[in-house]
């Protein structure tokens, strides 16, 4: 994970000497000079093209970093925004004496940036620079020695492989042993419910070693969004309790894929109740030999209270096809079971404390501490759920695992207090931050105060690479179910597969599959709900003539070349009845705005722009985008047109043969 490339050049490429200035004016002048040298002279010597879009973006970021601004930089595909922000981040870290944090949207993107073949190592090699960049991954990516010892015997043949790896690994990171399946890793990895304070390995475990390692980074710490916000929200409390924060002090923050921070920020600030975890506590207590009557009685009451709460909770959800988060309709019955559940948790928490003080032999100290932590978080979630009739929080049920989430509503205030008021440079980068250069929706969503901003289009020749086909007339739902399927079949056959079909819900994916049952195709159709997402994308890339249909491929997949030459938008991605979006709609109404115009349309436009970006990934790619939803003459037509690839030719779908 550490990148150490010895410098082979002298003079301007030696950052240690070149940026050894005591004032920001000198830094900004020299930084701009150096960026110009790198992008105009040094990189072209290695075969890189001079791209005005990249140079403009790099200069804008340099100005924002040196001036300690909050800056939004939107850079289209192929701009080279990663090199653009790295060329400011590295010298600024040297100037300030503290590393710059780069927060990525996923572990995969962390690896792409800081792995052995990533952009940072490439830049190190090209410039002859020694760059110290280290990854700080989510804590659950690391092994927990105690949990391994407690569970390893149950894994049969996998036990030997894990043991052999444990004898070799230094940091215990999951990427080193990718053969371990999810269900096993979940039982041996670090878990927030475990109390590290009383652990026999405290200060010596793999996670501690990993944190000690990345804390020493001189230049860059590459972190995921979740870990960054975990650190941000807990930093003050940890310092007050005499603990080190998760991340060391840093000089600036760069959010890669900055449009995706709202959900991880909310989830790290909130609490979750997972029924499976509560059931596991009850089951374990029931297995204790010679357990006290009061403990058994309280555990039994907890089982019933948990069942009642989740039964009423599931009856109260508002079903929305295209949302992974289901809003909750509060009523008297749910309030009553909430209070019963809360009371049972209090009683169980008291029994855990008694067990820890008097009957420690019946359960391990680690188990008791873990259960106490889970119970305390559940109590906190229920308290927030009932407080002030839920006006200061957002609650939802996760469609995937049925867990109950409670997160604060005032994220804007929290971001402002914990981050934006710290006078640090904060850079948001993405290909999708604005609607036709209008950043108002993103600014309003995060509660930003007059950030600087810049936007550049993709340097690709999209006029020659992309053709967009739009329906000239609108269809009713019934007509679309007939004509839309006929058009879809025709398009897939004409293009010989090689298509990505984007829908707005998994329910619509299933409807399309049912309507296609009578058709025969000379290529495979890959359905999102019929396989693991990463596996399906790999098959789609490799098979060349297949079709991929899904609701969650609008972003995050990269399929360059001939495997994808046709992108079909089955439905425009209008936002669902999502609790996070509902809060934005409510706030828009309270401010006198039309939520459809100020929330729904911009949200749809940004997601459509992301989806269209799946088609052209390189300068050599060519293809067509077909929208099967109505556009021309609709109130949202302008937003759709602004989200389409800039410069692409627009044609009517009726003439497509």
Image (cartoon, rainbow, N blue to C red):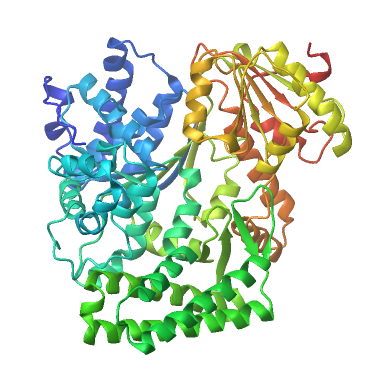
Would residue 80 be visible to someone looking at this image? yes
Classify the position of the N terminus by image quarter. Answer: top left
Residue at (29% x, 68% y) in the render: 236
Above or below, 204 relative to 455: below
Determine which quarter of the picture holds residue 614.
Answer: top right
Q: Position of residue 654 (x, y in %)?
A: 84, 18
Would residue 274 be visible to someone looking at this image? no
Determine which quarter of the picture holds residue 113.
Answer: top left
Q: Nearer the viewer, residue 392 or 82?
A: 392
Q: Position of residue 428 (x, y in %)?
A: 44, 43
The answer to whether 536 appears left or right of 357 in the picture is right
Q: Position of residue 105 (x, y in %)?
A: 42, 42
Classify the position of the C terminus by image quarter. Answer: top right
The answer to whether 419 appears left or right of 20 in the picture is right
Total marks in image: 0
Above or below, 463 relative to 385: above
Residue farthest bottom in this picture: 294
Determine which quarter of the picture holds residue 337.
Answer: bottom right
Q: Nearer the viewer, residue 90 or 423?
A: 90
Q: Nearer the viewer, residue 624 or 183?
A: 183
Q: Position of residue 18 (x, y in %)?
A: 16, 31
Residue at (21% x, 45% y) in the render: 172
Residue at (59% x, 19% y) in the render: 546
The answer to whether 588 appears left or right of 201 in the picture is right
């Amino acid at each position: 994970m550490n990148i150490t490339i010895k410098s082979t050049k002298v003079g301007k490429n030696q950052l240690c000497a070149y940026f050894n200035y005591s004032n920001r004016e000198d830094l900004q002048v020299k930084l701009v000079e150096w960026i110009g040298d790198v992008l105009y002279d040094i990189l072209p010597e290695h075969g890189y093209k001079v791209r005005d879009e990249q140079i403009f973006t790099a200069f804008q970021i340099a100005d924002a970093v040196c001036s300690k601004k909050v800056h939004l930089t939107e850079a289209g595909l192929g701009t080279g925004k990663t090199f653009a922000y790295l060329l400011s981040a590295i010298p600024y870290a040297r100037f300030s004496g503290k590393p710059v944090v780069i927060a990525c949207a996923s572990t995969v993107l962390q690896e792409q940036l800081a792995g052995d073949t990533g952009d940072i190592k490439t830049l190190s090699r090209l410039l002859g620079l020694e760059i110290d960049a280290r990854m700080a991954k989510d804590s659950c990516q690391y092994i927990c020695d105690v949990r391994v010892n407690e569970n390893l015997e149950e894994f049969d043949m996998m036990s030997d492989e894990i043991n052999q790896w444990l004898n070799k690994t230094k940091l215990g990171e999951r990427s080193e042993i990718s053969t371990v399946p999810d269900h096993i890793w979940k039982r041996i990895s670090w878990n927030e419910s475990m109390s590290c304070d009383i652990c026999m390995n405290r200060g010596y475990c793999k996670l501690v070693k990993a944190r000690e390692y990345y804390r020493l980074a001189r230049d860059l710490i590459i972190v995921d969004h979740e870990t960054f916000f975990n650190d941000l929200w807990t930093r003050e409390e940890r310092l007050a309790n005499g603990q080190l924060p998760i991340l060391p002090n840093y000089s600036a923050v760069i959010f890669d894929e900055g449009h995706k921070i709202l959900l991880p920020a909310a989830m790290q600030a909130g609490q979750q109740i997972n029924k499976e975890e509560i059931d596991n506590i009850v089951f374990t207590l029931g297995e204790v030999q010679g357990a006290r009557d009061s403990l058994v009685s309280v555990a039994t009451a907890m089982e019933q209270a948990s069942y009642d709460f989740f039964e009423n909770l599931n009856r109260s959800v508002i079903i929305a096809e295209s949302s992974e988060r289901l809003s909750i309709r509060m009523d008297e019955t749910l309030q009553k079971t909430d209070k019963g559940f809360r009371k049972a948790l209090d009683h169980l928490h008291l029994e855990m404390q008694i067990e820890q003080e008097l009957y420690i032999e019946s359960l391990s100290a680690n188990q008791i501490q873990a259960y106490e932590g889970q119970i305390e978080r559940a109590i906190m979630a229920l308290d927030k759920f009932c407080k002030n009739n839920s006006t200061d929080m957002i609650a939802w049920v996760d469609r995937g695992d049925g867990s109950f989430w409670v997160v604060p509503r005032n994220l804007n205030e929290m971001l402002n207090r914990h981050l934006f008021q710290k006078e640090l440079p904060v850079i948001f980068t993405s290909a999708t931050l604005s609607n036709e250069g209008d950043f108002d929706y993103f600014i309003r969503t995060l509660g930003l105060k007059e950030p600087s901003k810049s936007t550049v289009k993709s340097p690709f020749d999209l006029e020659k690479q992309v053709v967009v086909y739009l329906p000239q007339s609108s269809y009713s739902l019934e007509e679309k179910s007939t004509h839309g399927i006929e058009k879809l079949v025709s398009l897939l056959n004409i293009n010989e597969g090689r298509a990505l079909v984007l829908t707005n819900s998994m329910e619509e994916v299933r409807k399309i599959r049912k309507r296609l049952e009578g058709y025969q195709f000379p290529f495979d159709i890959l359905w999102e709900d019929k396989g693991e997402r990463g596996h399906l994308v790999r098959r789609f890339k490799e098979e060349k003539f297949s079709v991929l249909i899904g609701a969650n491929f609008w972003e995050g997949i990269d399929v360059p070349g001939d495997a994808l030459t046709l992108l079909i938008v089955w439905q425009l991605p209008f936002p669902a009845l999502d609790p996070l979006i509902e809060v934005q709609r409510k706030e828009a109404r309270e401010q006198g705005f039309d939520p459809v115009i100020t929330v729904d349309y911009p949200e749809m436009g940004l997601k459509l722009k992301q989806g269209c970006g799946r088609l052209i990934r390189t300068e050599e790619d060519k293809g067509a985008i077909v929208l099967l939803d109505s556009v021309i003459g609709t109130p949202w037509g302008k937003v759709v047109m602004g989200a389409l690839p800039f410069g692409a030719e627009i044609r009517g779908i009726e003439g497509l043969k």
